[in-house]
Image: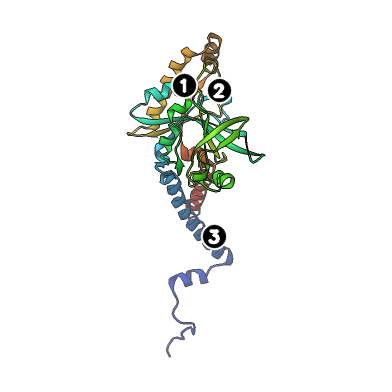
Amino acid sequence: MKPHKDASGPQTGWHNLIRGRRLPFKLGVIATLAIAIGANIAVLGNLGVLFGPVVPGATHYRLLEPYLQPMALKSLSPSQAGIPRPVYDALAAALKGRADVAFYEPDWGSFIIHGGQPHYMPYLITTASLTKVLGVHAIAGRMLNSGDSLAGSPPVIVIAARLAKSEFSSAEAAVGKVLTFNGKDRTIVGVLPASLSFPTGIHTPAEAWVPIPPESSALIGTLQFIDQYALVHTLVPLSQAALKVSLADAYRQSLARYKSDEQHFLNSIDTRMRVATLAEREFGPVLTRLKVLEIAAVLLL
């Protein structure tokens, strides 16, 4: 007599494996497969964050953020710790020819008045070099230039495309108009591209850029470590370790520009030189969660 065949047809090895197991095993296999698929997606997401474009013309791995971290404030994250203006000036001079360097300070307490109504918005006080570092161009008018930061220069502003459209109907119509910005009239000289979202991550994207004022003697002695940032776009291979060395040299050079009592204070605290990629600063929590997911998948598999 021929052996009886199952009416359901031929069975696969996978079916036989699952068929003879209990429900917890089946659920475990399904969960492991789901996590494995999720881990693969996470890996692809990591690659996109680390090596994809962050803004037009620049990539994460070439955008570095050097900053100082007094160990008394070691709880500060890269998104909180910054770099004083004198240190930035020395670092920019040292990196000339090897990298484009920009300095900026976000502000969320600004307001503009147009049409009689005040509008609160975030903005950046920045060097004109941020344009080159990020590789962006104005969609109407021009971006900031170095002359805008000189003493006696007319007050100007570059605004976001969204703001130009909401206040003036178009980017082209906005150029040349005057906004009352924090109580001071500024002429709109350009409009930022709509694709630009900077700063990103935990910081709200800026709605406007204004030129950084000339450095005065009053600013030189400011012991400012947070909310002032440097952004470095490397032009030649430049490791984080090499940039950290340049930062340490710039810090030592800048000490001479501080008052004697401030020099004593700076020498008495343990200040570490740090360098983070823009991906680490902007997407650090996301990257951490993706890594945890990958590790979990590996352990279960």
Residue 133 in the image: state x and y as whole percent: 41, 35
State the separation of the CA atoms marked 3 and 2: 50 Å
Q: Which mark is residue 63?
A: none
The residue that label 2 is drawn on is 224
Image point (37%, 28%), residue name: 242
Q: Are marks 3 and 2 in contact (CB under 8 Å)?
A: no
Q: Secondary structure at mark 3?
A: helix
Q: Earlier in the sequence, mark 1 or mark 3?
A: 3
Q: Amino acid at mark 2?
A: Gln
Residue 79 appears in the rendering: no
Q: Amino acid at mark 3?
A: Ala
Residue 69 lies left or right of residue 63; in this view the side is: right
Image x and y of residue 260, in percent: 53, 9
Whole-angstrom CA distance, mark 1 to mark 3, is 52 Å
How far separated are the C-alphas under marks 2 and 1? 11 Å
Is residue 260 in sight in this rendering?
yes
Residue receiving disc 3? 31
Q: Residue at x 43, y 36 (%)?
A: 131
Residue 24 falls in which quadrant of the image? bottom right
Question: Which residue was labeled with disc 1?
Answer: 87
Front residue of 220/286: it is 220
Helix, strand or loop at label 2? It is loop
Q: Nearer the viewer, residue 43 or 176?
A: 176
How many marks the image carries: the answer is 3
